[in-house]
Amino acid sequence: MANNKILVIDDERLINKFLASRLEREAWDVDTAIDGIEAMNKITRNKYDLILTDLIMPNVAGLELVIYIKNSKLNADVPIIVISSLTSDNVILDVLSIGVEEYISKPFSMNVVIAKIKQILGKKSVA
Amino acid sequence: MEAFKEWSHFIFNNAIYYYSVTIMFSYGLLALFSLREIKKYKQKDNLFDYQLLLSSPYLPSISVIAPAFNEGKVILNGLQSFLSLSYPKFEVILVNDGSTDDTLQQLIDEYELVKVDFAYHEVIKTQPVKQIFKSTNPAYSKLVVIDKENGNSKADASNAGINAAIYPLFLCTDVDCILHKDTLIKLVKPFIEEQDRVIASGAAIRISNSCEVKNGYIKKVNAPRQFLPLFQELEYIRAFILGRMAWSSINALMLVSGGLGLFDKDIVIKAGGYNHVSFGEDMELISRMRIYMHDHKLKYKVRYIPESLCWTEVPSDIKIFARQRTRWSKGLAQTLWFHKKVTFNPKYKIFGLLTFPYFILFEWLAPLLEFGGIIYYIYLIITGQINWEFAIILLQFVYSFSVLITITSVLYDEITGIKYSKKSEVFRLCLAAVAEPFVYHPLVLFFSLRGDWFFITNKKLSWGVMTRIGFKKKNKKL
Amino acid sequence: MFHPFHWQQYPVIIMIALVVSFLALAMIFVTLGIIYFHRIKTEDTNEEEAASELIIIEELNKHILRYDSLNEVPEKELLNVINKLTRLKQKSLVFTKVLTRTLMSFSILLTGTIQLVINATYNLLKLQEDTFKKLKSKLWFVKIEGLREVQEINDNDSISQVITLTKDNNINVRVSAYAALIQLDSKEKYKFLDDEQETLTLWHQIILTNAMEKIDSNELPDFKRYLGSTNNSIVLLCMKLILHYNQLNAVSSLIKLLSHKDDEIRCFVIQALGKLNADEAEQQLIERYPKESLGNKTQILLSLGNIISLISLKFLTDKFIRGEHFDILKSAAEAINTFPQELKKLVPIDSTLLDEKQITLIKHYEEPLNLYGSI
């Protein structure tokens, strides 16, 4: 079985690279996108097993990106984890209501992120 | 006749001279104040952690209000930029002011709107509201669309938006504006960091005519390439970065532009909302809010920040430009006349003692005096009385000083942050600054006079439709 | 036409004009020069910063931050990275600045064990020396910069200097010092709640609540202790904290505050009692109602909506039917809407008594699409 493929979308290079390097260490295939357009291009072309995304980015409104993923051909069913610094209740409720699997607010613990990913990917492989 | 000659000679040779020197001196002072304020802002801003602010539950919530009248070409782009703002809690209220084009239908289709029972309450009187829509798509749950009968003014539509707003602060903007994603967080900053109550804040507006825009984002900022927009960019930089910053530093601001301003809703409502018969409703509102605060002996501030957060399309067509400037000038005259009691009234402190007289003397009167001066010079030339040597020295004196002020504001703009990617663009602006007094300023002067004339003769002035070219159509479909 | 030789014969005003215009002309060229060099300098610095950031992120991610503790990092690898970064740091001030900034950003964005790794790296790179120098600076904004570094990196060695800064003349410096102290091991963490006399702006309050967010909530004091403060902004801050940490034992102290003389404080107390679902405050809220301003009245109605009881519902229904001001009707309708159906049936509203406005209000709150943002 091939490694699980994860797409990391965050416009902050610091977080983007950090997430990528930590996830690679867990032996996942990691792809990154630095803004909405790049993310959309990758989502249209490649199939992923999980997508990790920020909400506020240049070139696309965060929620729109999630909707784009949900409407895409290849990745409509892919679980999405949102990591964002917006922590107000209505933002979180909005995000969860459009079918995002997990909402993690910044600052976040990498161990929690990895545990959530494992949990989601585990559920998926059982199903 | 001899007496008249001597008298006019005195006025034009001395009074005008001292008047010009006072204007220049005040500009010099403004430049100094503005520099001090920009420096202060930058020191503070470096320490400001926006990440921390965004995750705080204590920020005041904001209603973004944008009126639209026949904006079919730009509506989706503009709205997109509002919905993508980075702020924890806000709503976007779009007021369709009885458009006769497909504005409303586009909105209904694009955002999956349905009509809802909405308890709209008319705190400020407006033209009747026909219906209110919300989006069934949870991604756009922030959006409220108000459909109302045309009220013939932006003020009337904005007032309807204020009536429907549920949050304590509101941002007033236009659908042809592209907002930076940090607009709200940066504009709210004065409200939360001042000990006195802040009743309004604003930031610089820039010109989007030559910028690359995509999905409601400015992809690349370019200095305008067309004739009129280029000079308007220069004018905006000077007005916002140099002028308003300086006025803000002494809490004497008279104007927060209609294109981008964050307001305390409570005070706006108490002051009576926008005046729908005003031609300069944004300036008129600030005047009225300030008067309200002084009348009730409340301490307050009106603040500007040296950031460019809003890009808007400006007229590149001389006819539309003429209409806009004539309207502004009429609006200024109207506001000053309407609130004339403020002038030199110590009750209104710096606003009555400095701002108001300054605007009367140097903003409103300047074009009239300038016009008078030109006529006088022409008279001197015709009658052969002119001393060419002195005339040229005086002209060169005024000219070099005004170019210096403009170029200084370009420098300030560069200090607040680099916007254009190429050096050549900045120098294009500097070149424009050199040419401005000869090619652009006469136009502005002429239209200002026309506005004053319309004010005096009470001639009706249509708001006019700003014909928009529109940004490239959205090429992405969700 | 132009005779510079006779300039002595010019009138004074013309001479002044001549001098000023030449000065202006010279300054135009100077300004153009500054614009040009400012560009070049900014571009260079930006480039250097970007390049430095790239190296730093790369090195940290590859060799240090992928581990959960510094002990896991192979000794040689660690030594190599630290040496490399230290070398670059000694060469350039820009690099040092970016290095500090990057570590700070990591520290702000991440929680958990990795925080310790970041702190240790900060120490190994000897960055706390720079931080300490900043604390000693005479400039207020440099002091704050230093304090923020101390706060994020939990630099306990600087405690005494931080305590000195809690007595600084500048309120912004003091608040940053309080925030830093909250995250350090100090006994005087919350002394400022007793001592601070000046008004804390909302921004100050956010800095402080944020600092508390990062420590174990069991270590926090009972904020009701400070509700008697004469500094209204401290009272407001403590109420926010009581709410945030759900300190229910503060309810009786809050009820006492209902007779505070400041309108804004009373408004917040009313709101807080509602959010804490304090049913013991119900009677006092209802008694308070006639004495309050319009704004506080609406707040009482909303708070009663949180205290789900029959008495509240009856009161709200009465206000809804007989209320005159739109704000009263609106808050009453909103509050009534929060009650469960079974209770609402017990206090039916006779719709024949209602006017159009009231009926629309009921419909308004029954429409799920309208509820966005009122959470």
Image: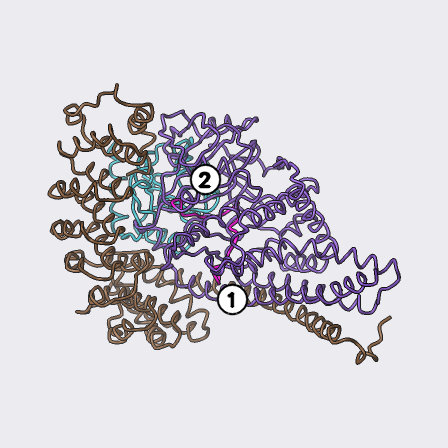
Q: Check the rendered structure and report the hue given to chain A.
A: cyan
Q: Check the rendered structure and report the hue given to chain B.
A: purple
> Circle 2 is placed at which residue position?
B65
**Viewer-proximal residue among B368 and C123:** B368
Q: Can see residue B185? A: yes
Q: Quadrant of the N terminus of chain C?
A: bottom right
Residue pictured at 40% horizontal, 30% vertical: B135
Judged by depth in the image, the label closer to the viewer, 1 or 2, is 2
Q: Can see residue A31? A: no
Q: Is residue B252 magenta?
A: yes
Residue pictured at 37% horizontal, 34% vertical: B141
Q: Is residue C45 magenta?
A: no
> Circle 1 is placed at which residue position?
C45
Q: Which residues are magenta?
A: B249-266
Image coords of residue B361 (percent x, y): 62, 58
Image coords of residue B161 (percent x, y): 44, 36
Residue pictured at 26% horizontal, 66% vertical: C197
**Viewer-proximal residue among C264 and C41:** C264
Q: Which quadrant would residue C310 be assigned to in this image?
A: top left
Q: Chain of mark 1?
A: C
Three-letter amino acid code at the position of disc 2: Ile
Cα distance in 3D space between marks 1 and 2: 39 Å
**Viewer-proximal residue among C128 and B430:** B430
**Viewer-proximal residue among C30 and C198:** C198
Same-chain status of marks 1 and 2: no
Q: Check the rendered structure and report the hue given to chain C.
A: brown
Image coords of residue A42 (percent x, y): 45, 40
